[in-house]
Amino acid sequence: MSTVLLTKRIEFAAAHRYFKPEWDEAKNRAVFGLCYNPPAHGHNYMVEVTVLGEVDPKTGMVVNLFDLKRILLNVLEEFDHKNLNLDMPYFKDRIPTSENLACVLWGKLDAQKDIGTLHAIRLYEDEDLYAEVTRAAGLDVASVTRRYSFMGLQESNQGREWDCFVTVHGAIDPVTGMVTDIGALDRLAQEKIVKALDRQDLRHVLGAESVTGGQLAEWVWKSLLSGISSGQLANIRLIQSRDLSFEYAG
């Protein structure tokens, strides 16, 4: 029998701060930016847990959804409304980045055999930023995705708002806990994407009579590729509307 993927979303709230106590303030600010600011900042995290398994011929389910929700709530209760730096022993010697937190949650959930085979965990800090770890890639690496938005103009100067999701994949730095420098990625994306495309005629920018979503996704990829400071550019996803999106991966 073929296997099926099932994804469950659930929320929890927690606070964290990025800093290395052995570094001075200048270095902490240079590496972690606003995430260094004391005392901490909070997030309403959204975690998507994807499990893999065969469909039970009796129940028609990969896993009992009631059991899955109960286990997720039990695991996340330990983290809910906590300061991850101060309250959680898992972050005594590592920074509670989204990448590291996703790995910690993986270890807790992978031990729960009643939920089937854990396939992936995607952890949203907010709508604009999430990290993902997968069984296939292993827990030493992760993907980080950041959203940027711009208004592109085409025929008759008619504008359309685009959401651009940039995904960077790579090893989790054991010192910083990050796949890539988010501050550097933000500066690169603002310069190469937002400033270049926002309220600009896309035909003029790309030098084409008309611009498709696929062409635009490829242009964004090529514009960012050489500027990624750490990790590797893995995917560009452009959302034209709730019903239409385009992806490019080199």
Image (tube, helix red, strand yellow):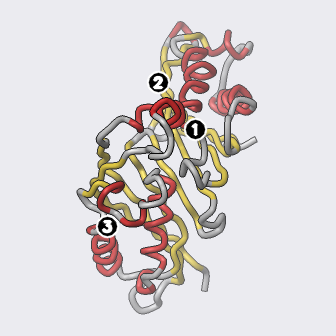
Disc 2 to disc 3, C-alpha distance: 36 Å
- What residue lies at 44% left-to-right and 44% top-to-bottom? 19
Comes first in the chain, label 2 or label 1: 2
Comes first in the chain, label 2 or label 3: 3
- Quadrant (top left/top right/bottom left/bottom right) for the C terminus: top right
Instruction: Label 3: state its secondary structure.
Output: helix
Which amino acid, mark 2? Glu
Which labelled disc corresponds to residue 76? 3
User: Which is more foreground, mark 2 or mark 3?
Assistant: 3
Which amino acid, mark 3? Leu
* Location of mark 2 (residue): 161
The vertical placement of 111 against 13, above or below, is below
- What residue lies at 59% left-to-right and 55% top-to-bottom? 174
Comes first in the chain, label 1 or label 3: 3
Between 186 and 208, the one nearer to me in the picture: 186
Farthest left residue in view? 81
Is 249 left or right of 41, judged from the image as shown? right
Which amino acid, mark 1? Asp
Instruction: Label 1: state its secondary structure.
Output: loop
* Location of mark 1 (residue): 181
Instruction: Label 2: state its secondary structure.
Output: strand
Between 11 and 37, the one nearer to me in the picture: 37
The vertical placement of 134 against 165, above or below, is below
Residue 53 x/y as whole percent:
53, 80
Residue 106 x/y as whole percent:
48, 69
User: Which is more foreground, mark 2 or mark 1?
Assistant: 1
Disc 2 to disc 1, C-alpha distance: 26 Å
